[in-house]
Image (tube, rainbow, N blue to C red):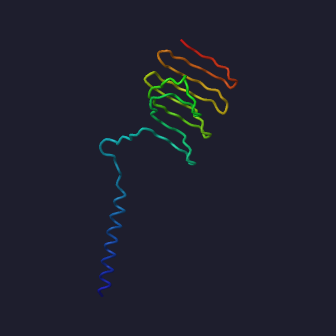
Amino acid sequence: MTNQRVLTALTLVNLGIMAFLVLGRGRTVEASGQLPVLRGSGLEIVDAQGKVRAMIAVLPAGPGRRADGTLVNGGKIAPETVLLRLIRPDGRPSVKIATSEEGSGLTLSGGIDPSYIVLNSNGGDPEITVTNKDDKVKTIKP
Protein backbone atom coordinates (compact mmCIF):
# COMPACT_ATOMS: atom_id res chain seq x y z
CA MET A 1 0.00 0.00 0.00
CA THR A 2 2.82 2.41 0.84
CA ASN A 3 4.61 1.64 -2.41
CA GLN A 4 1.47 2.48 -4.35
CA ARG A 5 1.17 5.89 -2.63
CA VAL A 6 4.84 6.69 -3.35
CA LEU A 7 4.45 5.68 -7.01
CA THR A 8 1.28 7.75 -7.35
CA ALA A 9 3.00 10.79 -5.80
CA LEU A 10 6.03 10.40 -8.11
CA THR A 11 3.74 10.06 -11.13
CA LEU A 12 1.89 13.28 -10.19
CA VAL A 13 5.19 15.12 -9.69
CA ASN A 14 6.43 13.91 -13.09
CA LEU A 15 3.18 14.99 -14.76
CA GLY A 16 3.50 18.42 -13.14
CA ILE A 17 7.09 18.84 -14.34
CA MET A 18 6.16 17.70 -17.85
CA ALA A 19 3.21 20.12 -17.99
CA PHE A 20 5.44 22.97 -16.83
CA LEU A 21 8.05 22.21 -19.51
CA VAL A 22 5.51 21.84 -22.33
CA LEU A 23 3.61 25.02 -21.41
CA GLY A 24 6.85 26.96 -20.93
CA ARG A 25 7.95 26.28 -24.51
CA GLY A 26 4.79 27.81 -25.96
CA ARG A 27 5.80 31.34 -25.00
CA THR A 28 7.68 33.50 -27.48
CA VAL A 29 11.09 34.82 -26.58
CA GLU A 30 11.66 38.54 -26.99
CA ALA A 31 14.80 40.59 -26.62
CA SER A 32 14.65 43.07 -23.82
CA GLY A 33 16.80 46.15 -23.60
CA GLN A 34 19.77 46.96 -25.79
CA LEU A 35 21.40 44.28 -27.89
CA PRO A 36 24.94 43.36 -26.83
CA VAL A 37 27.92 44.50 -28.88
CA LEU A 38 30.49 42.02 -30.12
CA ARG A 39 33.96 43.48 -29.58
CA GLY A 40 37.33 42.19 -30.58
CA SER A 41 40.48 42.99 -32.51
CA GLY A 42 39.58 40.74 -35.43
CA LEU A 43 36.98 38.42 -36.89
CA GLU A 44 37.41 35.38 -39.12
CA ILE A 45 34.64 33.47 -40.85
CA VAL A 46 35.50 29.90 -41.86
CA ASP A 47 33.83 27.41 -44.20
CA ALA A 48 32.87 23.81 -43.40
CA GLN A 49 36.47 22.67 -44.00
CA GLY A 50 37.88 25.24 -41.54
CA LYS A 51 39.40 27.53 -44.22
CA VAL A 52 39.22 31.26 -43.54
CA ARG A 53 36.83 32.75 -46.12
CA ALA A 54 36.38 36.26 -44.71
CA MET A 55 38.25 38.34 -42.18
CA ILE A 56 38.21 41.76 -40.59
CA ALA A 57 41.38 42.87 -38.84
CA VAL A 58 43.04 45.94 -37.41
CA LEU A 59 46.64 45.84 -38.62
CA PRO A 60 49.14 47.72 -36.44
CA ALA A 61 51.39 50.43 -37.84
CA GLY A 62 54.65 49.14 -39.22
CA PRO A 63 56.51 48.32 -42.41
CA GLY A 64 54.20 46.78 -44.99
CA ARG A 65 55.08 43.21 -45.93
CA ARG A 66 53.94 40.80 -48.63
CA ALA A 67 52.92 37.23 -47.79
CA ASP A 68 56.49 36.09 -48.56
CA GLY A 69 57.90 38.57 -46.01
CA THR A 70 59.40 41.10 -48.45
CA LEU A 71 58.87 44.78 -47.69
CA VAL A 72 56.51 46.91 -49.81
CA ASN A 73 56.75 50.64 -50.53
CA GLY A 74 60.49 50.60 -49.88
CA GLY A 75 59.98 49.68 -46.23
CA LYS A 76 57.91 52.83 -45.57
CA ILE A 77 56.04 52.63 -42.27
CA ALA A 78 52.36 52.04 -42.96
CA PRO A 79 49.80 53.53 -40.55
CA GLU A 80 47.37 51.44 -38.53
CA THR A 81 44.88 49.98 -41.02
CA VAL A 82 41.47 48.33 -40.84
CA LEU A 83 41.18 45.58 -43.46
CA LEU A 84 38.26 43.49 -44.73
CA ARG A 85 39.09 40.51 -46.95
CA LEU A 86 36.72 38.14 -48.76
CA ILE A 87 38.68 35.02 -49.67
CA ARG A 88 38.14 32.46 -52.44
CA PRO A 89 38.15 28.71 -51.73
CA ASP A 90 41.77 28.51 -53.00
CA GLY A 91 42.87 30.95 -50.28
CA ARG A 92 43.40 34.04 -52.46
CA PRO A 93 41.63 37.23 -51.39
CA SER A 94 39.19 38.41 -54.11
CA VAL A 95 37.86 41.51 -52.38
CA LYS A 96 39.87 43.78 -50.10
CA ILE A 97 38.66 46.97 -48.49
CA ALA A 98 41.13 48.93 -46.39
CA THR A 99 41.19 52.26 -44.62
CA SER A 100 43.79 54.19 -42.64
CA GLU A 101 44.53 57.81 -41.78
CA GLU A 102 46.25 58.16 -45.19
CA GLY A 103 43.20 57.07 -47.20
CA SER A 104 41.15 54.12 -48.38
CA GLY A 105 41.24 51.50 -51.09
CA LEU A 106 39.19 48.77 -52.72
CA THR A 107 40.63 45.85 -54.70
CA LEU A 108 38.51 43.46 -56.76
CA SER A 109 40.32 40.45 -58.21
CA GLY A 110 39.27 38.35 -61.19
CA GLY A 111 38.91 34.58 -61.19
CA ILE A 112 42.03 32.46 -61.57
CA ASP A 113 43.62 34.95 -63.95
CA PRO A 114 45.60 37.90 -62.57
CA SER A 115 43.04 40.56 -63.62
CA TYR A 116 42.01 43.09 -61.01
CA ILE A 117 40.68 46.59 -60.34
CA VAL A 118 42.08 48.87 -57.66
CA LEU A 119 40.28 52.01 -56.48
CA ASN A 120 42.62 54.00 -54.31
CA SER A 121 42.34 57.34 -52.57
CA ASN A 122 45.50 58.04 -50.58
CA GLY A 123 46.89 61.44 -49.71
CA GLY A 124 44.39 63.36 -51.84
CA ASP A 125 45.40 61.60 -55.08
CA PRO A 126 42.59 59.21 -56.07
CA GLU A 127 43.13 56.75 -58.90
CA ILE A 128 41.63 53.69 -60.55
CA THR A 129 43.97 51.02 -61.88
CA VAL A 130 42.67 48.24 -64.12
CA THR A 131 44.83 45.23 -65.00
CA ASN A 132 43.64 42.58 -67.47
CA LYS A 133 44.65 38.93 -67.71
CA ASP A 134 47.44 39.82 -70.18
CA ASP A 135 48.99 42.14 -67.57
CA LYS A 136 48.04 45.31 -69.50
CA VAL A 137 47.57 48.15 -67.02
CA LYS A 138 45.45 51.29 -67.39
CA THR A 139 45.46 53.94 -64.67
CA ILE A 140 42.85 56.67 -64.50
CA LYS A 141 43.63 59.83 -62.51
CA PRO A 142 41.62 63.07 -62.34
- Residue 105 vertical position relative to residue 41 in the rendered view, above or below: above
**Residue 108 placed where, x, y %?**
58, 28
**Residue 37 placed where, x, y %?**
36, 40
Q: Quadrant of residue 36?
A: top left
Residue toward you, 59 or 120:
59
For residue 6, side relative to residue 86 (left or right): left
Q: Residue at x 66, y 23 (%)?
A: 132
For residue 8, side relative to residue 127 (left or right): left
The quarter of the image holding the N terminus is bottom left
Q: Quadrant of residue 127?
A: top right
For residue 18, side relative to residue 88 (left or right): left
For residue 96, side relative to residue 23 (left or right): right
Q: Quadrant of residue 21?
A: bottom left
- Residue 141 vertical position relative to residue 56 in the rendered view, above or below: above
Residue toward you, 60 or 83:
60
Q: Residue at x 56, y 37 (%)?
A: 87
**Residue 118 placed where, x, y %?**
57, 23
Residue toward you, 8 or 113:
113
Residue ranking furthest to the bottom: 1
